[in-house]
Amino acid sequence: MKDIIIDFVSRLRKADFRVSPAETLDAVSAAALIGYDSEIHFRMALATVLAKTVDEKQRFDRCFDQFFYFPESTALSEPAAESNTLNSLPENNQSPDGQQPDSQSDTISSEELELQLTEAFSRALSDREAVLMRSLVTGDQAERDLMLQQAAEEVGTQDIRFATQRSLFVYRILQALGATEIRSLLMDINEAAIDRSIKKDNGQTLHSTQPPITDNDTFSSPSPSADSASEWLAGALLQLRRDAEHWVDKQLLQNNEAQLLRDTLLSERRLSEIERRYFHDMHVLVRKMSKALIAKHRRRRSVQKKGQLDVPKTLRVNMRHQGVLFDTRWKHIKKERPDLFVICDVSGSVSAYSKFFLMFLYSLSELIPNTRAFAFSAELGEVTQNFSDDSVEQAVEKVNQQWGFGSTDYGVALEQFSALAAADLRHNSTVIVLGDARCNGGDPRLKIMREVYDRCQRVLWLNPESKSLWGTGDSEMQRYLSCVHQADSVQTLNDLEKVISRLLRALQ
Amino acid sequence: MNPSANDAQVDISQLVDGLGEQGYIATQQIATAVYIGQQLQKPILVEGPAGVGKTELAKSVAALFDLELLRLQCYEGLDESKALYEWKYGKQLLYTQMLKEKLGDVLSDAEGLEESMQKLHQFQDVFFAEDFLEPRPLLKALKSEQGSVLLIDEVDKADYEFESLLLEILSDFQITIPELGTIVAENKPLVFLTSNNTRELSDALKRRCVHLYIDFPEAKFESEIVSSRVPEIADKLNTDLVNFVQGLRELDLKKSPSISETIDWARSLVLLNASQLDVEVVRTTLNLLLKFREDILLVDNDLGGLLRSSQERR
């Protein structure tokens, strides 16, 4: 039981849950306490100990369902709990072919069954095959799972990486178990039976073309003796195959590093080249990065609160102590909350960069509460309201739609920004401009930029192009460089994160 | 195969029933979390939107187990002296004044400063004994003799430093007071922490807790809660108003009505002797459900339609 929980926890960790070893221990205790006959209570108990945020709680249900599945019927001979998995035959009545051993044992006992089959086989069974036959016949789920697990380890299923390797590993497992051999023996029996009946009935009953012998077929061999037995065996082998497939799937999911790999790739790719279908992953990634940034930069603010003794206040407070200075009061350095003004170019290819940058910033609103955002291409407008109303992703879409038309004109944009916000720029404001500085031949209005530069504490320019392209063609970047404190080239999500981290450190 | 497993389920259903008697309708999830927290002796972190019954849960549990409820309301700037303990400075001073003469007697035969000091040292730390200690909720919970339920309300309003303070208490149920030493809880309190999720709590705190999320309930549940809190309400009115509120929650409101607001509304409707929900009654009492002007205007515009669709819900 402990191992199952540990397995489950490692599966959760791969799905981006942060589960500590202490919580794993709690989960084991909780599971022991609650027991597993009631799925609902078991699920709730684990959820309460392993999923600690609202988001995790929602994803937990999915992971739980993928990992555990509980049998609907009670056709198990022993409690499956003792075995290494809680997996079992799903809906015993559902397999379309063959009947299950339990129902079959009404008409024919398992020993007789086994005897019939082994007699009918063209050769003696090897040890491995005999063991398999025995377990198939007795329907011992626990033993079967154990055999599956051993076979899986033998063929190296723990190394499976891609979904395309599934059938290969399933085949290998079945081969290791000896199931493939038994199946071919079974096919021999059936062919022989068909031959016999052909001879008997003089071609009266049978179809001229034999139906292809596949796993999905029901064998209705007209021969009376090994008839029902072989049907049953075919069904049992099919079930075994299904179990093996499930095992392989589980391993594949556990090993699925694809998510991690994808995250690394996405954060290193040029933002303008990322296709739409990855946007959801990008959002998740941005949120994850912001959380990490928040955790990293959260502590710094409070260190600077301490100052000198505030003598008047101390004296006042200590009147009740007859002037003895028990209760000291200190001067507070009022930390003015930082002001951030962001001007983003939302036209063409630069829009992708603006989008992710704004997403980042607004995910960090806990640390930088006063962020005013402006978007422009042909015209400039303030978009701060969008971010307070909607979720970040929706707001970003709306901004694009509203302001992303026309060719960029930096001069007009700066002028309109000045009209809207120049009065609010203070000595401790930070202004960030995100754009490629390509003015399409228009007037760059450097004077306005210079005014902003003089007034603010910090002006940053983030350019999606690489440094070698600055100043080429209609790019006025070199001229704008004189009016900014720092200019960076940002092309990937990692670059954005670095810039923001530096900014946060400076703002604290 | 696990003999106590069935006991667990029995205990959980007993918990649900017991809480029901106290007037708190608990879901299986809530009861399971409380049970696990109790058995594993871990604090229970309850998160959820405002007004769903997080604080009520702690109160009901305390009433059910007949334990003292100690409540600590958190706010930004909450520190040790308000949460943990404080010295009774006034009392210390007063006693010093009153015992001036006695002190004089004690030190009368001491000559010189050093001897006097030595004499005083003999009395150990008389003025720092437990009598002069003013315990605040956290310390009270640790020292409680019959056990207690400690409710740390709105822990997300407190700051990061306060959370660090809580860590020792929540994991080991002990606290170190420099003058007195380490105080270990003899009867570990059952701790509830509530949070409105205005900010993310630190991992260290979360790790030490069992987590429970209480969301807005389903219609059936909400009806039960209303009839438990407002027993005199008619069944039909109960169903109608619950359906209406459920409908409101699907709209894009600034603040969705929570359970406490539903209960208030139910009470007021009973008070106004309303037998059914019609447009007039709802319009006049809308401000009990919705607390923002924009929301009220939004709903008012389409009141007839909303009432009709809520009728169709049942």
Image: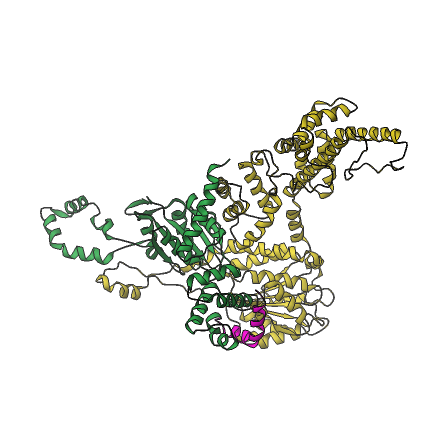
Task: Compare residues A19 and A293 and report the one nearer the observer.
Answer: A19
- Magenta stretch in the rendered image: B290-314
Magenta span includes B309: yes
Estimate the x, y position of residue A464 in percent, counting from the top left: 67, 61
| Location of residue A412 (image quadrant) | bottom right
Task: Compare residues A88 and B70 and report the one nearer the observer.
Answer: A88
Which quadrant, please, contains the N terminus of chain A?
top right
Relative side of A391 to A159, left or right: left
Residue A341 in view (yes/no): no
In the rendered image of this protein, does residue A505 appear above or below residue A124? Answer: below
Estimate the x, y position of residue A329 in percent, counting from the top left: 32, 61
- Residue at figure coordinates x 36%, y 54% from the top left: B63
**Chain drawn yellow in the picture:** A
Estimate the x, y position of residue A409 in percent, counting from the top left: 68, 72
Task: Compare residues A423 and B297 and report the one nearer the observer.
Answer: B297
Magenta span includes A52: no
Relative side of A198 to A235, left or right: right
Residue B270 in view (yes/no): yes
Task: Compare residues A14 and A310 and report the one nearer the observer.
Answer: A14
- Residue at figure coordinates x 27%, y 64% from the top left: A315
